[in-house]
Amino acid sequence: MGKKEVMDVVGRGEVFSTYGASPPACAAALAALDVLEEEKISERSERLSVLLTKTIKSLNPPHLLEHRGGGMYHTLVIDESKPGVTARRAAALATLRGVLVGNGFNRLRFSPPITITEEDLVKAVGIIVQALKDVETIGDFPGSEFIN
């Protein structure tokens, strides 16, 4: 919307986005790329992913069918064949203990921030694994009445 004399300056189909290729948007994108390179974000992601994977393997979580993922996005596929063992309950337990874990079907999904310390990453994985250990025997816990 605008005055006809202003709107007619740009031909039909010449503009698709208000700020998509504006000089400030391009400068911001270039600055973001500089940060990615200077702070070696990709290398950090790979290093943390390796640590996360090694930690999961070393803690040997019960009920684990498969571990999938890379970078900072990981999924644990859970065997839900035992009573009380569901990804949803395990995610709720981990969340109550301070680690936000997503769930869907029989999967736990988590994506720690790239800024997480190695110590906190190991601690978070430990909390998730402990939730998987406890989920079978813990019974009711705060909020469990809302989890089917």
Image (cartoon, helix red, strand yellow):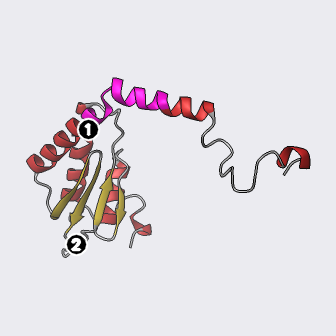
**Closest to the observer, 39 or 27:** 27
In this view, the residue farthest toward the top is: 38
**Taking 83 as reference, is 65 above or below it?**
above
Image quarter (top left, top right, bottom left or bottom right) of the C terminus: bottom left
Q: Secondary structure at mark 2?
A: loop
Say which residue appears at 61% left-offset and 43% top-offset. Answer: 20
Say which residue appears at 10% left-offset and 50% top-offset. Answer: 57
**Taking 40 as reference, is 20 above or below it?**
below
Give the residue type at disc 1.
Leu
**Closest to the observer, 49 or 103:** 49
Q: Position of residue 8 (x, y in %)?
A: 84, 49
Visible in this render: residue 35? Answer: yes
To which quarter of the image does residue 42 belong?
top left
- Magenta residues span 30-45
Residue 37 forms part of the magenta stretch: yes
Q: On the image, numbered disc 1 is attached to which residue?
A: 121
**73 sits left or right of 21 in the view:** left
Q: On the image, numbered disc 2 is attached to which residue?
A: 80
Q: Position of residue 83 (x, y in %)?
A: 22, 74
Q: Position of residue 124 (x, y in %)?
A: 27, 42
